[in-house]
């Protein structure tokens, strides 16, 4: 049976449909999850999609972090379930303290929307194992508050433990150490600002570099079963 | 009705792009020597009297929700103008 990958819809989520579609194209079963639900309905992995949950009020991701479904996401992440946070989903994961650091307003205050070049810094996660170490990829980036920040000690720890998963090749927003994505200690929770779900089909994307994200998690889930 | 005010500010070591933009605008308007850091003010109306426990509750809420302590500091105080002790 195909693994079940859930995508959470919060009020204001924007890319939940694209994420579900990318999951389907990868061969997994796409399972819509509702923010108000207190069950993950037996999914094998969870994606928190991009968008503007709760209008980005208070801080990006700050209100979504307390949605009922997040209690289960936090519990499952603690048990090793693969969780991927994309853009707003990354912000939610940081607010939930599943990932360290925070995302603040871009350095030049502008919304950035472009095909972003990245380097894969760690293939030792459930979402990046299908990449080659150091592989350079292009993934769509679109956000106003994508500047990654953490205190010096935290960044040193992330660097030392190989937990910087993606780095910008030409830093678009002032992120510390060109950080585009990080993971938790175990490597099952990954967050990044660029949008791999938009890079899975040649008709609509400049690259297919989003596909290995899904291939990675399917590999992982296949091994587990 | 009693009121508690929570001020949230970006930590000093964190660059504040909004404050920086406002500072730039001040300069263009001819105000010199003024540097702005921009934060948020939350006014919390509290049912009943403000006790130490209630204040502790607001402080807890501020730490959990109003501020992200990775990047922000917060300050909780009773708004004396609105309290009935006058």
Image (spheres, coloured by chain):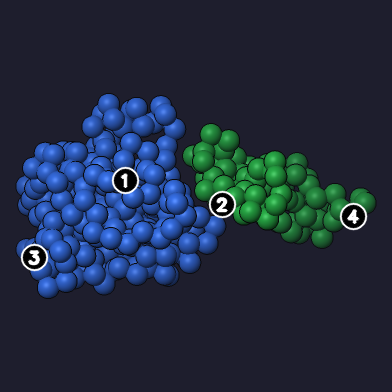
Task: Give the label, 4 or 1, closer to the camera.
Answer: 1
Q: Which mark is residue A27?
A: 3
Q: Is residue A157 visible?
A: yes
Task: Determine crowd level at label 2: few under 14, some 14-19, many 20+ residues with C-alpha closer than 10 A.
Answer: some
- Where is residue A4? Give x, y as percent: 17, 62
Tell me if mark 4 has few (under 14), some (14-19) or many (20+) residues whose alpha carbon lies within 10 angstroms of its own.
few
Chain the render paints green: B
Per the model, the C-alpha gap separating discs 1 and 2 is: 20 Å
Secondary element under disc 2, as helix, strand or loop, is helix
Residue hosting label 4: B84
Mark 4 falls within which chain? B
Q: Which residue is mark 2?
A: B21
Q: Is the residue under label 3 in contact with that under label 4 (CB below 8 Å)?
A: no
Residue shown at 19%/38% (left/top)? A121
Whole-angstrom CA distance, mark 4 to mark 3, is: 64 Å
Q: Identify the disc placed on residue A207.
A: none
Q: Which quadrant of the view contains residue B35? A: top right
Work out how far the residue at label 1 is from the one at label 3, CA to CA, in angstroms. 33 Å
Chain hosting mark 2? B
Please tell me whether mark 1 or mark 3 is closer to you in this view: 1
Residues at marks 4 and 2, CA–CA distance in whole angstroms:
39 Å
| Residue at mark 1 shares a chain with residue at mark 2 | no
Chain A as rendered: colour: blue
Q: In the rendered structure, are the residues bearing label 2 and label 3 in contact, judged by CB atoms less than 8 Å apart?
A: no
Label 3 chain ID: A
Task: Judge whether A187 appears above or below A142 on screen.
Answer: above
Where is B12 relative to A200, above or below? above
The structure residue drawn at horizontal position 56% and vertical position 52%, both measured from the top left corner, is B21
Q: Which mark is residue A171?
A: 1
The foreground one among A210 and A135 is: A135
């Amino acid at each position: 049976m195909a693994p079940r990958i859930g995508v959470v819809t919060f009020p204001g989520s924007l890319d939940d449909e694209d994420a579900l579609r990318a999951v389907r194209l990868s061969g997994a079963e796409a399972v819509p999850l509702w923010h108000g639900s207190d069950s993950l309905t037996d999914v094998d992995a969870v994606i928190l999609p991009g968008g503007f949950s709760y209008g980005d009020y208070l801080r990006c991701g700050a209100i979504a972090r307390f949605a009922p479904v997040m209690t289960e996401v936090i519990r499952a992440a603690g048990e090793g379930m693969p969780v991927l946070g994309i853009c707003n989903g990354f912000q939610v994961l940081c607010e939930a303290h599943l990932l360290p650091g925070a995302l603040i307003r871009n350095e030049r205050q502008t919304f950035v929307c472009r095909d972003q070049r990245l380097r894969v810094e760690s293939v030792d996660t459930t979402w990046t194992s299908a990449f080659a170490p150091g592989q350079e990829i292009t993934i769509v980036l679109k956000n106003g508050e994508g500047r990654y920040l953490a205190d010096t000690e935290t960044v040193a720890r992330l660097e030392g433990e190989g937990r910087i998963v993606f780095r910008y090749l030409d830093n678009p927003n002032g992120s510390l150490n060109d950080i585009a994505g990080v993971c938790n200690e175990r490597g099952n929770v990954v967050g990044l600002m660029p949008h791999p779900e938009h890079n899975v089909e040649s008709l609509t994307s400049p690259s297919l570099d989003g596909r290995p994200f899904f291939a990675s998690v399917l590999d992982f889930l296949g091994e587990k079963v | 009705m009693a009121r508690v005010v929570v001020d949230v500010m970006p930590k000093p070591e964190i660059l504040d792009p909004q404050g920086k933009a406002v500072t730039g605008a001040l300069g263009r308007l001819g105000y010199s020597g003024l540097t702005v850091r921009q934060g948020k003010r939350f006014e919390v109306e509290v049912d009943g009297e403000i006790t130490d426990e209630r204040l502790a509750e607001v402080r807890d809420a501020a730490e959990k929700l109003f501020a992200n302590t990775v990047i922000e500091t917060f300050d909780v105080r009773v708004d004396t103008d609105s309290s009935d002790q006058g």
